[in-house]
Amino acid sequence: MGDNKQKALELGQKPVGKLLTQYALPAIVAMTASSLYNIIDRAFIGQVVGADAIAGLGITFPFMNLSAAFGAAVGVGSSTCISVKLGQKDYKTAELLLGNTVTLNLIVGFVFMAVCLIFLDPILHFFGASDVTLPYAREFMQVILLGNVITHMYFGMNAVLRASGKPRHAMYATLFTVGCNIFLVIAFVWWFRWGIRGAALATVTSQTLAMIWQLWILGDKRELLHLRRGIYRLKSNLVRNIISIGVSPFLMNAASCVIVIFMNHQFLRYGGDMAVGAYSIANSIGMMFFMFVMGINQGMQPIAGYNFGAKKYDRMLRCLYLAMFWATAVLTVGWLLALFVPRPMARLFTTDDTLISLAATGILINMLMFPLIGFQAVIANFFQCIGRVQISIFLSLSRQLLFLLPLIIILPLFWGLNGVWAALPASDLIAAVVAAAVMWRTMREFRTK
């Protein structure tokens, strides 16, 4: 246990640049690999099952975002609380937070699964499914929802592993999930021809195996934080702390759900099922690069949270500046690729010429402001790391609800389908300006401290 405690203490002692690399690199590898296997899923579905299946899969994005919203409310909230408690050397409370995380994931995951399975078809229609795409979306989500408890637990335990000084173990869990999923997708979709249901089954199976390994690690009594009797009973003060911090990523993912619903309806209205499929492809490509930023944010979270708890504000700010720099650099690379090779990227998912043309245009427009939004995402996550939830919520929701939602409604009235696409970079630009203004004001406060 002494060695594990030292790993937690190094968050306040080791050079910040090395720490961010140590924590962010495994998260980046894990998140990018996770995005890659989602792309492989969609590529196999598009190539083997067909273009309509890609459109049907696009309808499930709001479902996935909504599930992620509930998972993030627990996982991100608890991991941030654990990081702060470790910074304060309150190891007993940190362990109670671990137990409460397990219980909350079980409760939230089961309730979400039950409600969504009961009302699955009406929900999918509301999300933008047509008579053509509904069967594909239903087949995929039935399997995903049955494994929802496992998915919540898997992501929640990965967040705990990172917060407790084990970023490499979190990376190994994700890489295993990716490798297993790719193998099973090839077997289920291409070999056994189980279609879109096979892709969903591959995802749930791989996450189940990874979760078993995570629980085995956290069950080791030699660990600083480990699963044991007496820590699973929910404590109101701990649950309030978890939810108060987790509400920011919850609202961000819930807002993404709302936005994707509106996007699907607008694409269906102005371009039909093929436009919905093009958005599914463009969104997948964009998310692959944005996963780098999410990995950087995950690496920053325990470092910023620990040093904020330890009142080492200079180290906290150095971590923030480095995270902003690397997020901007990564998304600039994505922007360049979207600018010069959008058609080859779209061709990975389908052989349909119409869908390729629509998706290539969508990739280019969707990623037009990528060089500006990297630091915006880091800033929003930074305020969450230090417990300033209201600012984090504002920055997270303003981009999607205050800026993007009105633009989705207004711009298509003038430019049709191109207006739906143009709403994405326009909202990114406005959100980046607002985030810069908020951060400039906050930096003055921390420099004083």
Image: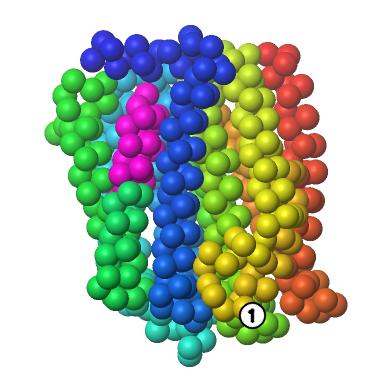
Residue at the image point whose x is 73% and y is 14% from the top = 448
Location of residue 316 by image quarter: top right
x and y percentages locating residue 58 in the rendered image:
51, 71
Relative depth, front residue between 236 and 125:
125
Q: Is residue 330 at all visible to an observer of this figure?
A: yes
Location of residue 30 by image quarter: top left
- Left or right, residue 272 beside residue 91: right
x and y percentages locating residue 286 in the rendered image:
61, 55
Name the residue carrying label 1. 354
- Left or right, residue 349 beside residue 435: left
Secondary structure, mark 1, is: helix
Relative depth, front residue between 136 and 154:
136
- Left or right, residue 267 beside residue 440: left
Residue at the image point whose x is 29% and y is 17% from the top = 4
Quadrant in which the C terminus appears:
top right
Q: Which residues are magenta?
A: 153-177
Q: Main secondary structure of the magenta part?
A: helix
State how the image is colored.
rainbow
Residue at the image point whose x is 29% and y is 56% from the top = 183
